[in-house]
Image (cartoon, rainbow, N blue to C red):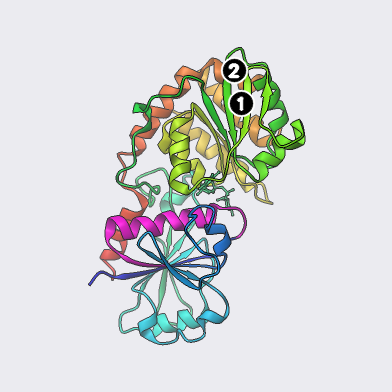
Amino acid sequence: MQPHWDIFCRVVDNYGDIGVCWRLARQLAAEHSKRVRLWVDDLASLQPLCPICDPALPAQALAGVEVRHWTDTVTVDWFAEAKTADVVVEAFACELPPGYIAGMAQRPTPPVWLNLEYLSAESWVDSCHGMASPHPSLPLTKHFVFPGFSSSTAGLLREAGLPSAPLAALPATPEISLFCYATAPVASLLEAFAASPRPLRCLVPPGQPLAAVRARLGGDGPWQLSLARIEPIPFLAQDDYDALLRRCAINFVRGEDSFVRAQWAGRPFVWQIYRQDDDAHRVKLDAFLDRYCAGLAEPAAAALLTMFQAWNTGADCAAAWADFLGHHDEIAQHAAAWNAALRTQPDLATNLVKFCAARV
Ligand code: TRH
């Protein structure tokens, strides 16, 4: 019998937490034939990524995954051993219900308990991946799983059939997708777009990106800024968003999951990292840039670095953007090479399945 997996996801804000968990759940079911339940405390956040999700339902089957609405009341009758799973993924330290933990402890064989951490390119994650933390009073051990860019980490989420984007043709008018936070220097980017000597289309999803564009340009769009057309687009289902990234010449992405998808798209991208109160994000950004720029020669590396830094500090990015475009071909070749190199590593779902196989 295939082991059962429970994935617990609490939505902190935005779409990253559920975006990662939804991908992982789907992949475990589709590629590894696991029976997966995904417990989400906020189904309304899953619905835009998976439009067939009905946020009113306490339980529903979606893409081979049993999606459950995780509410405080739903957990009270879970003390029985049979109701816990063989593998339990606690996403981003979301804290399992105490009743569920008690049920885990009652099983004849303890489940594999994984805490899935946020992605970081920092080198310390190599030594922390897989670390065990015994429960202080129960016969349970939690393992910390760190996604990452090196083979010493759990790797990155990547589906088996993921198309290799650089083979896909680009539309005649280059498209740029703009997924960012409200703090990005969107106004200066729009000014740079307005000065573009060639036609371009900038595609803007709803939420913070569109609000930032509206704040600058007024009205609801679409807007024509000389040769640049700025177009609002609907929030796309996750797979359609991935396809959009492969179709765009350049992608602005943010957070964790779209950041990874931009790398699988194999196109040049600009990443806005999720801000943390203690500025920990700056170290994470630098750690990624160190890795990413390693194979990129100067002055293209400097252009990329300057654009990322401007985009993340909120500084006027018009000059940085011009320089980034000036090195576009080199940056594009690098994005394709980076994509190809990363694809040689095993993916996160496969790594988790292997990690658990020895322990279930
Ligand atoms: O939404 P985010 O800002 O999520 C963030 C980060 O994950 C951050 O690390 C975390 O701490 C915080 O949430 C709580 O960005 P991210 O990670 O890119 O997630 C967006 C998800 O939305 C991703 O799965 C892609 C998906 N998406 C679509 O499916 N369709 C769309 O049209 C768009 C724009 C995004």
Residue 200 showing in the rendered view: yes
Q: Is residue 27 magenta?
A: yes
Q: How many marks?
A: 2
Tell me the magenta residue range: 12-37
Indicate yes or no: mark 2 CB to ligand 1 under 8 Å.
no
Instruction: Tell me residue 145's x, y (percent).
Output: 42, 58
Q: Quadrant of the N terminus?
A: bottom left
Compared with 325, 155 (above or below) is below
Indicate yes or no: mark 1 CB to ligand 1 under 8 Å.
no
Residue type (three-letter) at the residue carrying disc 1: Thr
Type of secondary structure dominating the magenta stretch: helix
Instruction: Tell me residue 188's x, y (percent).
Output: 71, 26
Q: Which one is in front in this view, the residue at disc 1 or the one at disc 2? A: 2
- Residue shown at 33% from the left, 39% from the top: 343
Compared with 46, 161 (above or below) is above
Instruction: Tell me residue 353's x, y (percent).
Output: 30, 60
Q: Is residue 262 magenta?
A: no
Please tell me in which quadrant of the rendered image residue 222 appears. top right
For mark 2, does the 10 Å Cα neighbourhood hold few (<14), some (14 to 19), or many (20 or more) residues?
some
Instruction: Tell me residue 257's x, y (percent).
Output: 49, 47
- The residue wearing badge 1 is 306
Residue 352 showing in the rendered view: no
- Residue shown at 30% from the left, 80% from the top: 109
- Which SS class for mark 1? helix
* 1 and 2 marks in contact (CB < 8 Å): yes
Residue type (three-letter) at the residue carrying disc 2: Asp
- The residue wearing badge 2 is 323
